[in-house]
Image: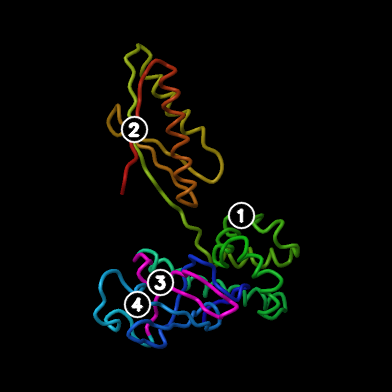
């Protein structure tokens, strides 16, 4: 059973988990697991790239598939889907996200019980609002596990916030993302060593908030910079900021430098 959504219809370009129900030579029909079993169609041309000799080599009745929504027409009750436009990484992400969302709904049910509410009331009072703001329930639980003020301005009832925050902190592991890069700093001035030290300290101290920056000497003039943050987006932004500060500082002191992003 998939967690419910406020909207009765999916959005164009959305990834949806489906169950194949009927397979014909020119198309496959599926039900959308997250949208109360609404039916969608995958045309043969959207099953896979290239020439397809037998559609059943790619889809079969009862199979779970992740599709991309191409078009939605509620007046006709039609949803056109694509299988070939979904990357393998997107398939894995969607399947895992559905599992996490099922877990999040269990937490919402538990919160509803503590508030002496039904799950329907929980969705109406907080669930749908959180989905709209954070994308899904699990994302909302992640947010409040990191910051108890995450629901301020979204949920008015402080009792709900207190209950949800407690459950999130007890059950949700906040993700931490780490990226690395190399600063190459040099100076031929008599005070060059001190200039490099000041540049590295300035880079480290320029970062505030959720991220953490650590800098290590690999083998001068190479210095490794590690950034940990609650998201890759934040980590990348902080990495750029710290590197820019280091380069600007060393250049002002008459030295030179460059930054190289280290890939995993």
Residue 18 vertical placement versus 93 (above, below): below
Magenta stretch: includes residue 195: no
Distance of label 2 from label 4 (alpha carbons) = 54 Å
Q: Nearer the viewer, residue 70 or 124?
A: 70
- The residue indicated by pointer 3 is 82
Residue under the point 34% across and 73% down: 45
Q: Nearer the viewer, mark 2 or mark 3?
A: 3
Distance of label 2 from label 1 (alpha carbons) = 32 Å
**Lower position in the chain sequence, tag 4 or tag 1:** 4
Q: Nearer the viewer, residue 12 or 175?
A: 12
- The residue indicated by pointer 2 is 223
Do tag 4 and tag 1 residues touch (Cβ < 8 Å)? no
Badge 4 density bin: few <14, some 14–19, many ≥20, Cα 10 Å: many
Q: Measuring from the top left, give residue 166's x and y in whole percent.
A: 63, 65
Residue under the point 52% across and 37% down: 207
* Circle 2 SS class: strand
Region in magenta: 63-88
Q: Nearer the viewer, mark 4 or mark 1?
A: 4
Quadrant housing residue 74 = bottom right
Do tag 3 and tag 4 residues touch (Cβ < 8 Å)? no
Q: Nearer the viewer, mark 3 or mark 4?
A: 4
The label on residue 262 is: none
Q: Measuring from the top left, give residue 20's x and y in whole percent.
A: 40, 84
Q: Nearer the viewer, mark 2 or mark 4?
A: 4
- The residue indicated by pointer 1 is 147
Distance of label 3 from label 1 (alpha carbons) = 38 Å
**Lower position in the chain sequence, tag 2 or tag 3:** 3
Quadrant housing residue 244 = top left
**Lower position in the chain sequence, tag 2 or tag 4:** 4
The label on residue 44 is: 4
């Amino acid at each position: 059973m998939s967690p419910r959504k406020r909207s009765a219809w999916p959005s164009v370009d959305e990834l949806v988990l489906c169950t194949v129900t009927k397979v014909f030579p020119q198309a496959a029909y599926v039900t959308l697991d997250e949208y109360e079993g609404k039916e969608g169609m995958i045309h043969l041309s959207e099953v896979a790239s290239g020439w397809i000799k037998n559609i059943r080599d790619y889809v079969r009745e009862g199979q779970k598939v992740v599709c991309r929504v191409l078009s939605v027409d509620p007046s006709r009750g039609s949803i056109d889907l694509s299988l070939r436009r979904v990357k393998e990484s997107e398939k894995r992400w969607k399947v895992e996200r559905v599992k996490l969302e099922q877990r999040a709904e269990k937490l919402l049910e538990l919160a509803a019980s503590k508030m002496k509410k039904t799950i329907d009331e929980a969705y109406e009072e907080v669930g749908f609002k959180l989905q709209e703001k954070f994308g899904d329930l699990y994302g909302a639980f992640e947010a409040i596990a990191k910051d108890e003020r995450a629901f301020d301005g979204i949920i008015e009832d402080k009792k709900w916030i207190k209950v949800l925050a407690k459950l999130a902190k007890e059950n949700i592991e906040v993700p931490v993302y780490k990226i690395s890069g190399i600063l190459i700093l040099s100076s031929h001035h008599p005070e060059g060593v001190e200039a490099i030290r000041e540049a590295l300290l300035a880079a480290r101290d320029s970062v505030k908030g959720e991220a953490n920056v650590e800098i290590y000497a690999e083998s001068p003039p190479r210095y490794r910079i590690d950034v940990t943050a609650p998201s890759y987006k934040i980590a990348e932004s902080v990495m750029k900021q710290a590197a820019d500060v280091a380069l600007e500082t060393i250049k002002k002191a008459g030295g030179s430098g460059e930054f190289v992003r280290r890939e995993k």
